[in-house]
Amino acid sequence: MYQNFQAELDWASLHMPRTKRAVSSLPDLSNVKLACNMHLDLKMAPLVEGLLSQGCEIFLTTCNPTTVQDDVVNYLVKKGAKAHAWRDMSEAEWSASFDKALNWQPTHLCEMGADLTTRLHDNADKGESTPTIKAGLEATGSGISRLNGMAPRYPIFNWDDLPVKEGLHNRHMVGLSAWQTFFQTTHLTLHEKVVVVVGYGLVGQGVAASAKAFGAQVQVAELDQARALQAKYDGWPVVDLKEAVKDADIIATATGAEGVIGARHLDTMKDNSFILNVGHVAKEIDVAYLKDNSSHSEPMPYVNAYKLKDKTIFLLADGSMFNLTAGYGDSLNAFDVTLAVMASGIGHIVGEGSTHQSGLYLLPEKAWKSAL
């Protein structure tokens, strides 16, 4: 993807000073084996390289195969990391990566989606041997939802719900980068377009606000009564999704849940409409239904055209996380804040955090505020 990888990495590092400071302030990590399950794009390289320089052993897996940048993984492996991740790896290969990471016997986990923790607990429930994890980090709402449904066997620190993560990345950057990627990918703007945003959590709020700023006519579909009321108070028309898809030019899913857009929605969408997903889960849209019931072409990179009956539906990035699969995701300066907090969180789980009893905790303020 990168024409001059080292030049782009140098550029990223130049504009990520908070991450550099946060990593350099970490203690010696020579006794830490950190298994990471996260997006593996260019912006992650300064963090991982910095951790390696502090003596940390690292095993890299991905939380989403469509967002892996192979040159990033290859670079980090040359720097000393172990990895089992590549772009568009199959479901079986992706699943196997979780077992490989756990068989590596990590001491700590750093996750986006709780895949490693879920696999570890599933294995333990089957009576299989599992590594002794001292503490973990979780960065996503989807992951926190999964963790709330289990009794963690070690302390896990939630940093998705920190004000700086919610207010910066979730609320602003996902929506902004999603529409920037839309413009670059389709060569279209949002003018005269009816955009239906599905889900009005913090990510959905940012997607809606950015779409409006770029000229769209925005509607919100939200099942939760409290969030739907908030959307009304924010000035958005709140619509029934089943009816709204009939007139939508663009549907953007931002729920983090599976099966949000199904056959009944796809069958009633209008000709030449677009669907994109910016949620963490790659299964918000029933892609299998489209593939099984339509012909397929790719008129532009990351624009998947499905001829369904008498119409064409354009599914962007085949339903994967659009802003990071087809685009660059967060800006360097904004993600610098995110990674600095992440680095500080790693400092917490290898130190005081590892002394906590098993359970799910919010990453304490003293563990991350200095990173800002």
Image (cartoon, rainbow, N blue to C red):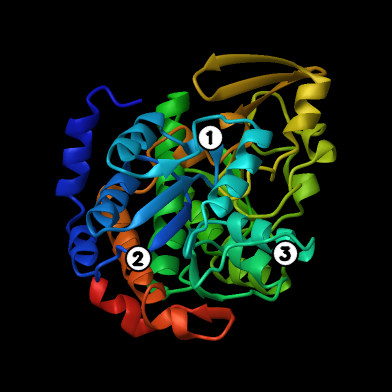
- Which residue is denoted by mark 1 in the rendering? 66
Name which residue lies at 41% across and 66% down.
165
- Which residue is denoted by mark 3 in the rendering? 124
Q: Amino acid at mark 1?
A: Thr
The answer to whether residue 163 is left or right of residue 76 is right
Quote the CA–CA distance across marks 1 and 2.
32 Å
Pointer 1 with pointer 2, Cβ within 8 A: no
User: Where's residue 85, x and y in %?
Assistant: 50, 37
**Residue 16 seen in the current view:** yes
Few, some or many residues within 10 Å of mark 3 (<14, 14–19, 20+):
some
Q: Quadrant of residue 70?
A: top left
- Which residue is denoted by mark 2 in the rendering? 31
Name which residue lies at 42% across and 59% down.
34
In the rendered view, tell whether residue 84 sits above or below residue 201. Answer: above
The answer to whether residue 210 is left or right of residue 118 is left
Under tag 3, what secondary structure? helix
Q: Amino acid at mark 3?
A: Ala
Quote the CA–CA distance across marks 2 and 3.
24 Å
Q: Quadrant of residue 257?
A: bottom right
Name which residue lies at 74% across and 43% down.
261
Quote the CA–CA distance across marks 3 and 1.
29 Å
The answer to whether residue 170 is left or right of residue 126 is left
